[in-house]
Amino acid sequence: MAAAGAEARGGEGWRAAPHAVPRPPGKFPGPRKRGRDARADRSATRRDAASRAADTAAPRRAPPAPPWPWPRPRPLTLLATRPARCPQSPPAPGPCEVRPARPAPGPPPSRPAAIPRTRRPGPGCRSRPRPLPARQLCEAWCVPCLVSLDTLQELSRKEKLTCKSIGITKRNLNNYEVEYLCDYKVVKDMEYYLVKWKGWPDSTNTWEPLQNLKCPLLLQQFFNDKHNYLSQVQKGKAVTLKENHSSLQPAIAEYIVRKAKQRIALQRWQDELNRRKNHKGMIFVENTVDLEGPPLDFYYINEYRPAPGISLVNEATFGCSCTDCFFEKCCPAEAGVLLAYNKNQQIKIPPGTPIYECNSRCQCGPDCPNRIVQKGTQYSLCIFRTSNGCGWGVKTLVKIKRMTFVMEYVGEVITSEEAERRGQLYDNKGITYLFDLDYESDEFTVDAARYGNVSHFVNHSCDPNLQVFNVFIDNLDTRLPRIALFSTRTIHAGEELTFDYQMKGSGDISSDSIDHSPAKKRVRTVCRCGAVTCRGYLN
């Protein structure tokens, strides 16, 4: 888009292509010598000294123009040079090309003229790229763009450019849609609202009468945000704001705008999470507590992400050939444990017992009753902002039966040494995302601080409603089990999901299971779960 805008403005990166003076057919220029004028050399062999003296005394005249049948000189044409790609630059996250709007149709030119070629590069410009026409450049070249979608749309409409990749076409180039309401005033008994138009810069905001607005939901959100702000001010025992019915105070208008922008950012984050997930359950996001937006340094993943130097072999070496895994010798029996689930897909083994599910080499189908964790979350969950100072949390939007699978804890798999180093940094910040994989040994740890799924936002509780289990599916390495969270009781819709951060998959949550050795002594994080059995600290 920057290139297209530069074309319209004649800015940096654009230059006029040189063109040659047309010659009559059959007249081709001869070879030229470097450093001398070939025309002067030919003149010296055809004219004598007297003629040269006369030419020197008389003023020179421009050569006569060629007759009309020959093509006339074409005006200068703006061409764009293809930008060079840096060999060390990362690949573009996505194409973003902006095409200039086509001009209005008009009469065809009298005769088509070819685009002139540039001069041959000299010895010092051996790698000079060949220029491309502006239209061909926009269609063939993709430029990495790190700007938000709103900014791209605003710039496109400002420059009158169309781009299908960002949703700006000739049909909606000049469309106006209300994005949110910014302010309110009353003039001559008529209500006006300051409207922010979707895809247009703030400089184009306009005051519109209420009768022209057909957006009841945005109007309701406007008054709800205003009411919430006034409630917070009164609850905080601050200076009471006198409500003016003719206009809004600047502090109220600023809060309404920030709340509207936050709502838009959270909706986009919600859409991004649902695009990346690979399970059935939907993910929702809400924040009715403060103005906190989406986390800036968090990337949603669906499975373990190994750190450099760690290899995860996700390929089973053997599988069952059962027709009914309930009554035949299945994968758990081969591992020396019992089948973990009953016919209602509820877990029936005690905490600390590993779960062995059927894998990719098994001959049973996807409807096998021993395939539960690998199907992912089946419940719709909501990432919400807590009101007790615990940051983000997760609550269920539907009823969850007891002893059923809820979600899997995923993140970056790192070594225990690296976990010790990161743990000290996290403890200083008061956050906890490290989960030790200590089913058989203590070599690896899962770090969900930067890479994770919904479980990244699940809070701790000393009286949790989720239990940790170690699961083996395709990767049968006992050092790298998968971590599954099952419900310990019936969880009603709207209830927050929690698990005990001191659970290591063994079911032991006593104080003896907490390691207080000097090598691992860190800053202790205060627990805010509010349970009756609260231990006071997270670590």
Image: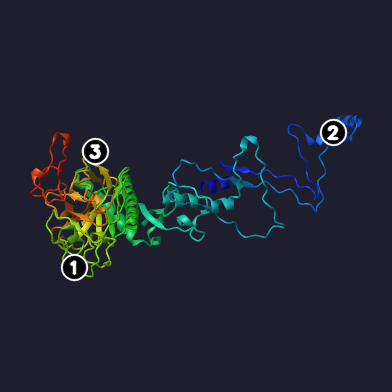
Secondary structure of the residue carrying numbered label 3: helix
Q: Is residue 349 left or right of residue 269?
A: left
**Residue type, numbered disc 3:** Glu
Count neighbours of disc 2 (C-alpha within 10 A) and say few if under 14, some if 14 to 19, many if 20 or more.
Answer: few
Question: Please, what is the three-letter code of the amino acid marked with disc 1?
Answer: Glu
Question: Percent position (x, y) of residue 135?
Answer: 58, 53
Across and down, in percent, residue 375 comes to 26, 61
The type of residue carrying mark 2 is Pro
Gap between marks 2 and 3 measured at Cα: 88 Å
**Most foreground residue, 177 or 56:** 56
Q: Secondary structure at mark 1?
A: loop
> Can residue 186 be seen in this snapshot?
no
Q: Nearer the viewer, residue 11 or 47?
A: 47
Looking at the rendered image, the disc whose residue lies closer to the viewer, 2 or 1, is: 1
Is 11 displayed left or right of 74 in the figure?
left
Q: CA distance from mark 2 to mark 1?
A: 110 Å
Few, some or many C-alpha atoms within 10 Å of disc 1 (few <14, some 14-19, many ≥20)?
few
Q: Is residue 338 left or right of residue 82?
A: left
For the point 21% across and 61% down, which residue is it?
331
Label 3 packing within 10 angstroms: few (<14), some (14-19), many (20+): few
Q: Quadrant of residue 521?
A: top left
Tag 1 residue: 328
Residue at the (27%, 43%) spot, across then down: 414
Q: Position of residue 37 (x, y in %)?
A: 78, 34
Q: CA distance from mark 1 to mark 3?
A: 43 Å
The mark that comes first in sequence, 2 or 3, is 2
Which numbered circle lies on residue 417?
3
Question: Residue 237: percent from the left, percent from the top?
Answer: 19, 43
Q: Secondary structure at mark 2?
A: loop
Towards the viewer: 497 or 327: 327
The residue pinned by badge 2 equals 59
